[in-house]
Image (cartoon, rainbow, N blue to C red):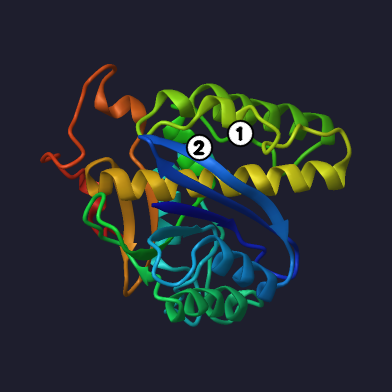
Amino acid sequence: MKFLGIDLGWKSQPSGLCCIEWADQQLQILDLDRKEAIADILNWVDTCVPPGESAVIAVDAPTLIPNATGSRLPDKLTHKHFGKYHAGCYPANLNLPFAQRTVNFGLELESRGFAHAPTIEPQKPGRYQIEVFPHPAIVHLFNLERILKYKKGRLSDRRQELIKLYNHITQTLPTLEPSSCTSRLRGSLLPQIPTKGAALKAAEDKLDSLICAYVAAYWWYWGEQRNLVLGDRTTGYIVVPQRIGDRGEGEEFSPLSSFPRPSHYLLCP
């Protein structure tokens, strides 16, 4: 089973791309790249996951936008539930310049058999796509008090925050379930954190795509037992891993066992 993370450029900027595979009870990075043209991104998808192969594709972009103006329900819910971590997302509506690009990208994935999966049967093979948002995912997976602010600010500050993300990826992800292969994370595929602006942005895109790919794997592995779903197929939705600390340290759960759904699975405004 493969998991693709796409940190999609909402306008014309490059997109971070990551492909990981579940093999021998571990997640291993197969590819970490960055491409600009949508056609090149789709060719990359087709190469990573040929027709008939199973995969979950996690896209950091609004691929379902039902509203002409204002904000989608999942956008509002990120502010309600993750605003205290500074992890609310940008609003999306059909009148914004990026809408056609991001919605069409979701349709291109659907045409390749990747169905939207705001609900999923854990560990069932298939071709799925979901919308994700790295900021709250990072806060929850690494049990942080706020987002890592590597997007804005002084270059030196952004770099330090990106180094923190790199360290969480290499040190914490291997301890989670499903586990990532430590040697592959620390190998040549993972970018070093540069000191110049353009190179730092490229590294940021790649690490964001890796987080997206891991969220895809986490969604497939655990389903609704350990993930939150903000919205649904009609309103648009965002899948976010449940906060690690909410489950209790050292507590074990079977991926297919019953697990109570938190109240904010509901479509509360």
Tell us which disc is closer to us: 1 or 2: 2
Discs 1, 2 touching: Cβ within 8 Å = yes
Q: Secondary structure at mark 2?
A: helix
Percent position of residue 59, x then y = 51, 60
**Left/right of residue 73 with respect to residue 144 in the rendered view:** left
Residue 218 drawn above or below residue 117: above
Report which residue position mark 1 lands on.
148
Percent position of residue 141, x then y = 43, 33
**Left/right of residue 48 with respect to residue 11 in the rendered view:** left
Percent position of residue 183, x then y = 57, 25
Instruction: Please tell me which residue is depicted at 60% across the width and 71% down the height of the picture.
Output: 42
Q: Quadrant of the C terminus?
A: bottom left
Q: Residues within 10 Å of mark 1 (few under 14, many from 20)?
A: many
Q: Amino acid at mark 1?
A: Leu
Report which residue position mark 2 lands on.
138
Q: Secondary structure at mark 1?
A: loop
The answer, for residue 144, to whether it is visible in the render is no
Residue 142 drawn above or below residue 213: above
Q: Quadrant of residue 192?
A: top right
Tell me how far mark 1 sits from mark 2, CA to CA: 8 Å
Percent position of residue 1, x then y = 38, 52
**Left/right of residue 115 with respect to residue 91 in the rendered view:** left
Instruction: Please tell me which residue is depicted at 74% across the width and 66% down the height of the picture.
Output: 36
